[in-house]
Image (cartoon, rainbow, N blue to C red):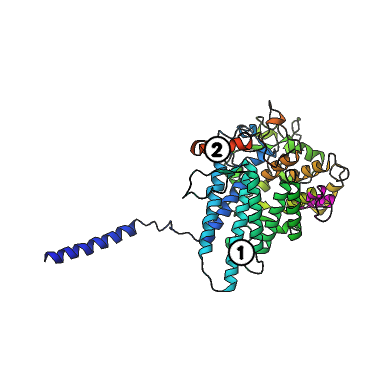
Amino acid sequence: MKKILFILLVFIAASCTKDFEEMNENVKSPEEVPGTTLFSNAQKGLANQLASMNVNTNIWKIWAQYVTETTYTDEANYDVINRSIPDNAFLTFYRNVLRDLQEASKLIAAEEYAAPEDIAAQKNRLAIIEILNVYTFQRMVDIFGDIPYSEALSIDENINPKYDDAASIYTSLFTRLDAAIAKLDDTNGSFGSADLYNGGDVAKWKMFANALKLKMGIHLADYDNALAKSKVEEAYNAGLLTSNDDNTSMVYLGASPNTNPTYLDLVASGRHDFIATSTIIDPMNDLQDPRRPLYYTQVDTSTEAGVVKLAYVGGVYGASNPYSAFSHLSSKLEDPTLECLLMSYDEVEFYLAEADKRGYSVGGDAESHYNAGIEASILYWGGTAADVATYLANPGVAYATAPGTDFEKIAKQSWLASFNRGFIGWTTWRRLDAPVLNPPPGMTQADIPVRFTYPVNEQTLNGANYKAAAAAVGGDLLSTKLFWDKN
């Protein structure tokens, strides 16, 4: 009898253990997530970081001087520590983007297929993931300089990764990008609707990857001209974006939580933090730029009662500016469905204009690419063909008569076109030293940052490697130029 009772108790205990295990399972939080879902999540995390105007995460529109702040002017005065901005960027790129891409790649690589078209689509998916890895790492290098790279995602083996040399990372990224491009087969599918950028269109991913190679090559022009020429010409010959229809972007939805982050920052927050700067408004006024109403609002400048005199007015960069006295961002920027561009046709055309002036073989000439970049930007924002013709006929815009050197002309128009892509505008200024940006009151041109400082958390948690990296780049300062910034 005792043996029977003991056996019954064993069965009851086993049954209870199973029940308790089931009770501890969180059915709303699966232990395994499909690789395609992780890929989509990485895309959204990357686009959100690029599109945001939240000063805790993204201050590029401020540093490019498309906008300045009204009351709280820390970021316009280059304080990145108070809100831990470098830490937030570091965390977003490594954890929300690169880590998800890494896991997505592992899971998708482990999938088994029999049909040739399914195997081909799997290869495409892995190649696209690799292209986004390259895009993300390249952006991080252009923000910080030397960064954790070869050991960055091996957290199971090393929680204190070393920092790799930025120039060497570029070399590695070129190799990875070339390999990924070679694996793309645009006769087969990829992610389908799970691809939030290109809808699974492999041909568009090829153009995107070639444009990324073009961009990286141009960045190296003053550092290693021979390598830059080789990569730019390879990209051009392989096929680049040919119109705004080829742009790569994240299209947002009209309802939270899938709206463009800019909508949250400008509208949903109910805050009035940003106004236009005189840095951009003054030259746009001088040129009668047709994009003014597409970028900004007008403000009443009349001093007489009952009289309305509307104009585009920019505030002093870095100063405390009253919101009501200056132009604000237009309603287009307040649209919750506003897309986030990752690569655009106008960006490509301005790179090609610059490449021609450097003696690279990229078809056409600098003027034709310059004009195409301007046209693409105006049409993208909602301008007309007539607007384009009038603008290009302006002596201050026309390539033959616009003031400045060839590179200064290209830089100015590229910067104007990059209005909603602050990082591109700021990087154009860093590379070509044009157009002229205005230092905040009490500062000089030398105070305008050319990189982010490293995260405070890295100084605390990865101290030895941080110190080595700081010494290697020439000092962990906002004024320390990146390796490709030679002028």
Q: Which residue is mark 1?
A: 124
Residue 466 percent across, percent down from the top left: 55, 38
**Residue in the foreground of this view, choosing between 449 and 254:** 449
How would you classify the magenta stretch by its main secondary structure?
helix
The answer to whether residue 339 is visible is: no
Q: Residue at x 51, y 36 (%)?
A: 463
Quadrant including the N terminus: bottom left
The amino acid type, in three-letter code, at marker 1 is Asn
Image quarter for residue 427?
Answer: top right
Callout 1 secondary element: helix
Q: Which residue is mark 2?
A: 466
Relative to 330, 36 lies left or right = left
Q: Nearer the viewer, residue 251 or 58?
A: 58
User: Residue 71: x, y in percent?
Assistant: 61, 31
Task: Pick the residue in front: 197 or 314.
Answer: 197
Q: Quadrant of residue 385?
A: bottom right
The magenta stretch is 355-376
Above or below residue 210? Residue 477 is: above
